[in-house]
Image (spheres, grey):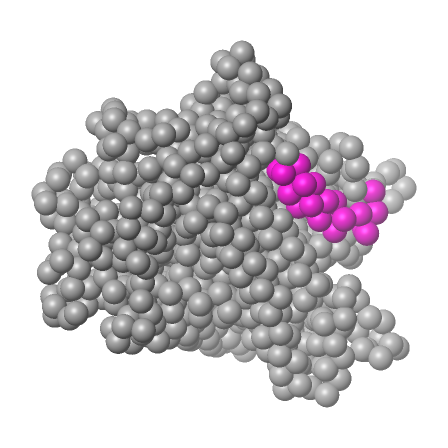
Amino acid sequence: RGGYNPGRSFANCAATTMGFSATSIIIGAAIIGMIWGLLQFLVIARIPIRSTSVDEGSSLVSGANDEATTQRLIEIYEAIYEGAESFLKAEYTVCAYFIVVFSAVIFVLVSWGTGWDFARGLFTAVSFVLGAGTSIVSGYLGMKVAVFSNVRTTVSAQKPGWTACFNVAFRAGAVMGFSLCGLGILMLYLTALAFRVHYPVAEDWIYLTESLTGYGLGGSSIAMFGRVGGGIYTKAADVGADLVGKVVHGIPEDDPRNPATIADNVGDNVGDVAGMGSDLFGSFAEATCAALVIGSSIGLTGGWDAMVFPIIVSAVGIAVCLVCSFLATHIFPVKTEAGVENALKLQLISTTVLMIPAVYGAAVGFLPPSFELNAAVGIDKTLTLSPWEAAVCVIMGAVGGLVIGLLTEYFTSHSYKPVREVANSCKTGAATNIIYGIALGYKSVIIPVIVLALVIYGSFTLCDMYGVALAAIGFLSNLATGLTIDVYGPVCDNAGGIAEMAELDPAVREKTDALDAAGNTTAAIGKGFAIGSAALVSLALFGAFVTRIRHSSDDTLFSNGVNMLEPLTFAFLIIGGMIPFAFAAMTMKSVGEAAMAMVVEVQRQFDEKPHLLDANPTERPDYDACIAISTKASLREMVPPGIMVMGTPLLTGIFFGVTAVSGLLVGSLIASVQLAISMSNSGGAWDNAKKYIEKASPDSELKGKGSDIHKAAVVGDTVGDPFKDTSGPALNIVMKLMAVLALVFADTFYAVNAGRGVFNLS
């Protein structure tokens, strides 16, 4: 294995001559990512919020008064900004109290579990606070950029052609994608370097990596509140606005006469942008922490640079995504409606393809010709690995992510048969639409799960559990591009809402709808990536948990793996499988209750102000009342699901022991993956089936907007809203958060009756 390799010799020679070390690559890439995000923001900021005419003879603005329209655009922009700002401040205030309390819990329990090693307790608590803080900054930054950019996308859509408006929305996503990746990598690596001062010897790096796991826990905890709170907020407003506005009164989506329309647009920013940002940041942090814990023994033979190889992969990913972003904005600019979706798909495909040689180069440049790794299963079993094996694991993850993303597109885009079947089912009413949509979601689980199984088998065969962790890193290697595309969708959605509320010419709304339709599909692809990566991250964290228990127990526990046929393990396997369903039930009911309150409020305003529904209303809706309903409901309802997800593994470990926790984590992972994929894809299919019907002409089979077929589609889309934007995506966090929490408190669990729990069950 250690023979002459020209590729390795060249890479090592280049790395040595140019003086590159892991630290310079990682910190350099992080800073470049943040600077690139700032440059994209400055380009967007140069666009003034001003309604403009296309030329002297025509305008895309209804009416000739551009000044009045400009004023209206600014009013709407400020209303959305203030709503999003006030909600996030309220949400993050709750999160701040949680961080203070839970960091104290971590400090006490981890210190006690490690025999009152206060350094490890303190370092874990500090890394938890840093992870949570970075997640909050990521979410808040994403919201600010999205709100700042959506009105400028609307303004750019008034210009002829597609290039200007697409580039604004795409650059808005890039600000979030590159800034978050740069900040996340920088904070994690600087924390590791700071801890290295206390743990300078390679033999002690296991404690360094264990302390770093708090970073992943902090990121995922905030992601839980962001995803659930933001998801309840946005879907309460969306469902309420759709049911009363479109179904009962037949007014268009985002019509300014609808009192819930501002709350709906605020929700896109706090749920789809801030929530998704925190979610994917959490995945990155946890995947990296899991790989570092499992691969900490690599430091003994390969040194520091080899041990931090997982972070190097993420750093290389920033550079690859940056290069590929020019494909969308400069090399192949969007010039037609069809070019929008192609440009976004090209980003995903090109970054994945370019990551293959980049990852191989990083592996041969920073990993030694052969390195040793302690096996996850087996006493005194050491594996001798080579860089190409590590590279192949990362590449399998990257390619697997792309395959799952493209499969998700097939099941959620109205360009393909499955969604068109759902649209046709609306001819016989809402019931058949819902039946078809649920069946589509279940069917869409089959191939992604097989792909995940192949990636897990292949990566584990090559590099043991470390390979699975590297595959999870591979899934997230083009995270900057994934986030760019995810944020692009809500920005276009908001841009269309603003065009409708400002009563711009219908041609502007048609253009933003086309941008949004592509964004819907790519958002579904992004959710596929997020779910797939969450499954691998969760499995890698479980492997890290087993590794840590083996280390704590001096190989008396789990040395031959986890026996699923032990009564306690099997019992908690079943309980773990129940958790995602309980979580989905809690979050969906929360959306339902908040939506009911919203429906009542909107109908009350229509009853008390009957002139609101006039073509040119003389009365103004009370938008603030609807914003208040969404805010109160989401802040109140986000806490119980979070307590259940975080409390279950903690109480299980303390009272029933580590074998029970093992069953709980595996059961939760298996059920969450299936449920998350099916719910996300059902919701995406219902949404795009509705859009497909809306594109149809009144004399076609589907009858188009306003028909009974369209109303049936709207009902399906309304049911799908909490599926795809609240419960489905939040299930990613359920499986990751439970696993990372178990990992952080592994020593604590073992300290209670040698891992048998308070009840001392064998």
- Identify the magenta region: 335-356
Against 316, residue 762 (above or below) is below
Using the rendered view, name the quadrant where residue 589 is placed: bottom left
- Would you say residue 711 is visible in this rendering? no
Question: Is 608 on the left-hand or right-hand side of 110?
Answer: right
Q: Is residue 117 magenta?
A: no
Against 47, residue 144 (above or below) is below
Q: Main secondary structure of the magenta part?
A: helix
Question: Is 52 on the left-hand or right-hand side of 674?
Answer: right
Query: Can you give x and y, in whole percent of width and height, for residue 684 in the image?
Result: 62, 66
- Would you say residue 205 is visible in this rendering? yes
Query: Can you give x and y, in whole percent of width and height, for residue 467 in the image?
Result: 47, 47
Q: Is residue 342 magenta?
A: yes
Query: Can you give x and y, in whole percent of width and height, for residue 107 in the image?
Result: 17, 45
| Residue under the image location 62 percent in, 79 percent down | 439
- Depth check: 615 or 224 in front? 224
Against 217, residue 663 (above or below) is below
How many numbered marks appear?
0
Query: Can you give x and y, in whole percent of width and height, for residue 193 in the image?
Result: 32, 27
| Residue under the image location 65 percent in, 72 percent down | 686
Against 210, residue 627 (above or below) is below
Question: Is 753 on the left-hand or right-hand side of 473?
Answer: left
**Image quarter of the C terminus:** bottom left
| Residue under the image location 32 percent in, 73 percent down | 565
| Residue under the image location 44 percent in, 63 percent down | 731
